[in-house]
Image (tube, rainbow, N blue to C red):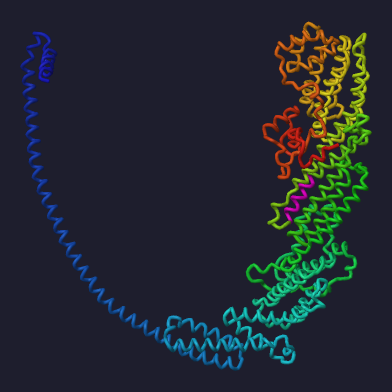
Amino acid sequence: MGTMDKQSAVDYINQMFPTEASLSGVEPLMQKIHSEIRRVDAEILAAVRQQSNSGTKAREDLAAATSAVQELMYKIREIKTKAEQSETMVQEICRDIKKLDFAKKHITTTITALHRLTMLVSAVEQLQVMASKRQYKEAAAQLEAVNQLCSHFEAYRDIPKITELREKFKSIKQILKSHVFSDFSSLGSGKETEENNLLQQLSDACLVVDALEPSVREDLVKNFCSRELTSYQQIFEGAELAKLDKTERRYAWIKRRLRTNEEIWKIFPPSWHVPYLLCIQFCKLTRTQLVEILNNLKEKPDVGTLLLALQRTLEFEEELAEKFGGGSQNRETENDSGELHEGENTSQTISGIRKKYEKKLAAHHGSGNEEQDQHRDLTLPGAGFNFRGIVSSCFEPHLTVYVELEEKTLMENLEKLVQEETWDPEEGSQTNILSSSMQVFLIIRRSLKRCSALTKNQTLFNLFKVFQRILKAYATKLFTRLPKGGTGIVAAATGMDGQIKTSDRDERVICYIVSTAEYCHKTSGELAENVSKIIEPQFVDMIDMSEVQDEFSAVITKALITLVHGIETKFDAEMAAMTRVPWGTLESVGDQSEYVNAINTILTTSIPVLGSLLSPIYFQFFLDKLASSLGPRFYLNIFKCKQISETGAQQMLLDTQAVKTILLDIPSLGKQTSGASSYSKFVSREMSKAEALLKVILSSVDSVADTYCALLPEGTPSEFQRILDLKGLKRTDQQSILDDYNKRGATTTQPSIHSVVPAVSSTSIAPVLTSPSAPGIISSGEEVLARAAALGRGFSATGFKKFLALTEAAKDRKDGTLRKFFVG
């Protein structure tokens, strides 16, 4: 640091005196520096003096502040002491005031209690006099007063005088209760007409009952209802009226009783709901008696009588529900199940059911005057009592005869509809649905409407099971109408065993059956949904039409397979004609053969009709099965021919290409080309095998093995040997070629010739069932998808499309609950 200062000083001097001449200015510079030093010393001295004076002042200020704080603390302690003295003085003053206040309060309470006690003693004595004189109106008001006074003495229950008064009051209330019950026992005995003031007295007695405990009112009303129903119980327990056909008179009795005593029963306060409670007791008693009558029947009840009794019961319950609160359930039912009534006469009532089954009961009608009761001024307590079903539910276990009669009627109607079926849609109809199917659902809807008007419990569920049986029976009727294959000795002798011959009319009927079964499948599901909406909740989960829908699905499957079999049978003659052509001696190749023209004629006749009558999904399914049948069949038919020369093979190749063109044109013939692309690939793949086979036959003897392995790599030795036979080679000449082929290690994965028979047989497609009755039909999802994909159609996996895509899963199955549907 010193070196730097010295260096700076040297630099400064050198800067000020750069030359020797400039040294002459040293003296003035020294004087200037000394002058600056004296000035700085003076400033330092002044600063030191000022700092010394400031420290002294600061010490004096601090001492003054400390003294002020001490004085302030002394004054605060003095104020606190005086505040404590003031608080003590205020507490002493307030203590005296509280004593005086408590004394005043106790004196006031004592005076009030004594005054109330005086009033209570006087009121109890007055009440005792009123009770003895049966002055009910005055006693009711006095009871209220005594009750209020007693409430003030709850804290004094242990005082003897209070206990004595309470016991006396309790005995007076008991006396009043006995007097009131005694007076009410004369109500209904005829005394009310003789003594004019009796009704007024009883009306006043009701005021007393209201002033007493609620249990008194409950006991009084219960006793009154029991007395009123005693005569009813005696009358209708007698042998003459204790019958099912006298049920209507029961309800006439109670309605007459309500109407006759309407004015008299006005003595009861509206809040008591006496008619309402009387009707509840009546319904419970009536149910008990009807249950006994129904259980004691020695034989099944007459349907007409049973339904009439149930009808009158339902009407009575509806009247009570209207009178005592709640809207008409029938109107709600009609709205909820409006879809079920389509095409029906909506004015049909429950009485129509009775007329349908028992016309002799038409004369039984209740009095119109008795059914008119418009008084609805009663306010029900709480949510009210549900009258609907309180009596009618006892009929439920005995409605089996009704369900049996409904089933018999439905089955008879079904038989009649099927017998009258023309198997043609109605004229002017825009659909291909048979009229019998729509009529079947119409009679089912009518039956459902009739039953839902009676009950929505077990009986409706039993009737739903009847609907299932009816629809299954109709599915069987549709199935039996399908053309059947030939059976018996004659069919076996003519080679027609199992073959189905279908006319143009048969093909149209089959298409109508497919459309009808589809309609029934859809409508069955809708029927189940509608029943689920109206049936009681505990049965909703059991409402299921899947089994019925499976039946109709089976009909659709069988109908489509029958169509395929019918077309196949028409091809039999042409396939035979193909084998009769002298392929080994043909001299030249000409136009397509006659059997090809015949095949074309068959398809151009049938396909346009089928395309116009079948929906796209079923038409495509039909084409898939037809193509999967004709392709392998044509391939197999080549092996059935005798020797084929080179010219014959060329002609047959020409015919094969013509047949392929005809098959590819089928979607256009049917005017349904939505699935033409994948269908064309499928047909081309199947027919290319036949073309490959003919190309092998056309090859030279030396290259036949190479050509066969190249074009048909999955061929078998037996099939190759048959090709050599078709070429006209002798067995001795074939051996060397066969040995050469076997050395090539030909695979044996291809089925033999005899297994290439058309796959569409009577069991090639079975309906897919999901019910427990048919387990194991589908082995796995992968297998199902693989088999569905083998069709080459790519159907959607929903609804009917799923059904059609999955049908191949059971093609090899030889058993199952629906096996009977696929036996020719």
- Compared with 444, 251 (above or below) is below
Q: Position of residue 458 (x, y in %)?
A: 74, 59
* Magenta stretch encompasses residue 533: yes
Of residues 754 and 192, the one nearer the viewer is: 754
Quadrant showing the N terminus: top left
Quadrant for residue 687, please give it. top right
Where's residue 699, x and y in %?
A: 81, 8
289 over 824 or under it: above or below: below
Give coordinates of residue 542: x percent, y percent: 71, 52
The residues colored magenta run 522-534
Give percent across and percent down for residue 677. Answer: 77, 24
Q: Main secondary structure of the magenta part?
A: helix
Q: Is residue 189 visible?
A: yes
Residue shown at 7%/25% (left/top)? 35
Viewport quadrant of the C terminus = top right
Residue 707 colored magenta? Answer: no
Q: Is residue 784 above or below residue 220?
A: above
Location of residue 819 (image quadrant): top right
